[in-house]
Amino acid sequence: MSLTPVDGKRPSDGDGDGDEGRRKGRRRRALRWSAIVLAVVITGTAGAGYLYYQHLNHNIKKDPLNIGDEKDRAAASKANAAGQKPLNILLIGSDARDSAENQKLGGAKDTFGSAPRADVQMLLHVSADRSNMSVVSMPRDTLTDIPKCTDPDTGKKYAAETDVITNDSLGRGGPGCTVATWEKLTDIHIDHFMMVDFAGVVSMADAIGGVPVCVDANIYSHTSSGKGSGLKLKKGTTAVKGTQALQWLRTRYGFEDDTDIARTKAQHQYMNSMVRQLRENATLSNPTKLRSLAETATKALTVDNGLGTVAKLYALSKELKKVPTDRITMTTMPWQYSTTSSGRVVPKPTDAAKLFRLVREDIALDGKDKKKTTTAVKASTDPAAADDEIAVQVENGTRTDTTSAVRGRATAVAGLLVDKGFKEAVADSSTTPSQATTIVRYPSADLEGDAQRVAKALGIPTSAVKKSTSVSGVTLVVGADWSTGTKYKAPAEDDTTPTSADALNGSDTTACMHVDPNYVWS
């Protein structure tokens, strides 16, 4: 994937670029998921009696999982034919400067105690059968819609906003709002979140003896104007620790084309290497080091109530360890530059939607899935009503960017449904959306069975049945892929990961960051 923007613009950054009057408070922001992953793998192994166990539990901070409106929640993941369910965990890196240590690492004294931002957001998906794991990063400069959120501590309500930078979600009541934002964007149900601040990554990189990273030239991320993280490494592979690890994770100026996208690529390299170190590093068998790491990890963590004890974190760690390293795939949400906000990015419509679908449907991003059996319908799904009692609105979505909507298409398909016994099906001529592929939407869980029944009657795949708060009842949108005829032919679904997701395999030991020649030192 090319990282050079065609219009010469670059995403804005928080590393201290003085151009365009950026606040100092956006300097030195870093990826902190390393602390999160280490905490999951380690905390449960450091028990030293009941009192110490309780002490570690007390260290862990907890927040509600989702503080958005219930109507905006994505439907819970369905079990596979064996009754297994996937796990979706949102990893959040907070830029909070709420302690002396975080302030020292984060800089920007004028922002001490200000609302934190979710500067790192990664969705970790563990397959239902635990055979593979997918990670999707969202660039920090992504513009998205943030739903209505309610602060669980103060009761303050934050109104929904559109086209705002994604990291603002954390300051609207806490991590539960960041979870709500992801569910609204991706329609992927999130089971847990884990959030870590600046200090965690520094201590834990030391605990495993450093994380090997690679650059293809000597790099010094620093300029006379104050840009850069301060990272200084020689060409080749170096095991970074402590503050140097933090510098690697927050480096933008010096990697590739100096964008936040390049920084994400470096973060993926670090995460893959760290996972390998965790599985191979013998120093983790040292009880003293384990205890120190457990202390640091639990103090750094904020999690949802479902992960709020060492025992629950340890149980999760055992699930994660079932996944072979070579079945871990790191990706970046496909993106494109915003046409309305300079330097920002937005999800690339077709590719991002495809990547989210693959995760939502539990399809491995490495292309190594065995043929899946038909997904079992959730036991909690309400059974469908009788066909002649299901009310269906049919909309004509055959309009495209280059052609007008096919006249009378909604009426024709509504007639097909009536002929099949759906007497309450009616055409809705008040709206003509643009919909590439035919879809059935429903607003709430009690109508999911009805929506699935309508889809089955017309030969529409269950993957095209979606929960949506934009409809008030079962709604069939006839897409441009069904502009003629009485039988729907579902398009063959391409389950390959989009190349724009820039996938990196967890076992890849050859990854090496390209250094911008302007930041090479001799």
Image (tube, grey):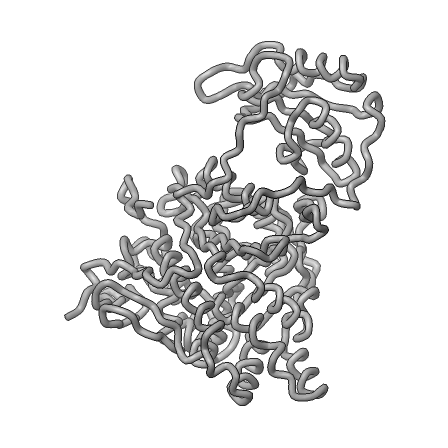
Measuring 75% from the left and 44% from the top, which residue is drawn there?
A: 378
Q: Tell whether 202 sits left or right of 425.
A: left
In the foreground, 301 or 126: 126
One can see residue 128 in this view: yes
Q: Quadrant of the C terminus?
A: bottom left
Q: Nearer the viewer, residue 284 or 428?
A: 284
Q: Position of residue 193 (x, y in %)?
A: 60, 61
Q: Residue at x 49, y 75 (%)?
A: 200
Quarter of the figure that contains the N terminus: top left
The spot of residue 331 in percent (x, y) is: 44, 52
Residue at x-position 56% and y-position 41%: 357
- Asked which quadrant contains residue 153, the reply is bottom right
Give residue 393's position: percent from left, percent from top: 71, 22
Q: Is residue 168 above or below residue 211?
A: above
Count of marks overlaid on the render: 0
In the figure, 24 relative to 501: above or below? below
Q: Where's residue 312, x and y in %?
A: 68, 70
Q: Quadrant of residue 48?
A: bottom right
Kindly give the residue lying farthest to the left in the view shown: 522
In the image, taking residue 4 as reference, residue 401 lies left or right, namely right
Rendered image quadrant of residue 414: top right
Q: Name the residue nearer the viewer: 256 or 472.
A: 256
Q: Which residue is rendered at x = 31% and y = 48% of the image?
A: 3
Q: Nearer the viewer, residue 260 or 223?
A: 260
Q: Is residue 157 visible?
A: no
